[in-house]
Amino acid sequence: DGADRQKALEFYTQALAIFKELDSKPNQSITLNNIGIAYFQAGEPQKALDYLQQSLPLLRAAENKNSEAYTLLNIGRVYRRLADNKKALDYYNQAQAIQRETGNRAHEGETLDDMGLAYSMDNQHEKALEYHRQAAEIQRSVGNLRREAVALTNLGEAYNRLEQPDKALEPFTQSLSVLRNMGDLTNAAIALQGIARAEQKRGNLADANKHIAESIALDRKSTRLNSSHLV
């Protein structure tokens, strides 16, 4: 929650000052990244961008390719949040090039899925389909079931936006099955919303209402479970 994020930011800021004093560049880059992610999660994308951008030259100097690529991915996400898809895709492409070079398949799949979301925001839904499909295939090949399921949900949503609800149902259903088995109620609720939209487009209003009700019930259950873990 907000209080936890504020505590984390205070901790990271103190740590950054110490690492600067010690001239520890690797720890500075990690801490700058953490601050950037915390600001992003707090809904302050401009501040997030500032810290993530500061981290990049340190990572490049250290030739830390995996962390550089993940930072580029996160910068792309910030630009997507800011609705600047051109810049988002530029950073995603830089991230993907490094991930392909280093053979980091799981993170490449994550980047491809984000690229699909950026293309969807630009109403380029056919392109989005291809990127979400590639992302799901990569995550399946590396055994990352949750990321595969999220990519399948995004694939289903792209089909919905193309007014192809019959094709949307299969990836949504596959995703829902995996997420339920994993106990990921939040993402399962999102998949159910997608199924409801597809059924509505197909004219099956009773099924659409049923899936919306299931989605709301799962979302409430997820919220209760998360709240029970708060200190």
Image: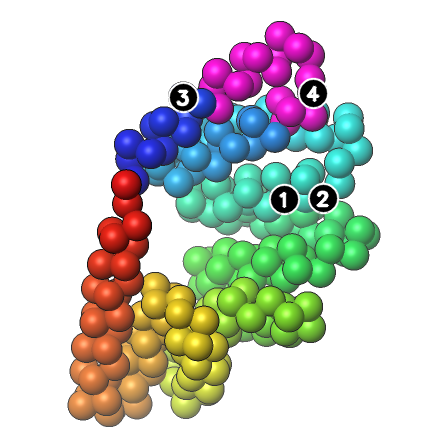
- Inspect this view and state whether residue 107 appears: yes
Q: Main secondary structure of the magenta part?
A: helix
Identify the mark at residue 43; answer none if there is no mark. none
Residue 90 at x, y percent in the picture: 62, 46
State whether residue 179 is above or below residue 4: below
Crowdedness of circle 4 by 10 Å Cα count: few (<14), some, many (20+)? some
Residue 7 at x, y percent in the picture: 36, 27
Mark 2 / mark 3, whichever is N-terminal: 3
Q: Residue at x 39, y 40 (%)?
A: 41
Question: Does the residue at mark 2 contact the one at mark 3 (Cβ under 8 Å)?
Answer: no
Residue 18 lies in the magenta-colored region: yes
Question: Is 69 situated left or right of 153 in this image?
Answer: right
Mark 1 / mark 4, whichever is N-terminal: 4
- The region drawn magenta spans 12-29
Q: Residue at x 41, y 26 (%)?
A: 9
**CA distance separating discs 2 and 1:** 6 Å
Q: Secondary structure at mark 2?
A: helix
Q: Which residue is mark 1?
A: 70
State whether residue 10 is above or below residue 46: above
Residue 127 at x, y percent in the picture: 57, 68
Mark 1 / mark 3, whichever is N-terminal: 3
Crowdedness of circle 2 by 10 Å Cα count: few (<14), some, many (20+)? some
Residue 111 at x, y percent in the picture: 61, 55
Q: Which residue is mark 4?
A: 25
Identify the mark at residue 10; answer none if there is no mark. 3
Which amino acid is tagged 2?
Asn
Which amino acid is tagged 1?
Tyr
Question: Does the residue at mark 2 contact the one at mark 1 (Cβ under 8 Å)?
Answer: yes
Q: Which residue is mark 2?
A: 66
State whether residue 209 is above or below residue 124: below
**CA distance separating discs 2 and 3:** 26 Å
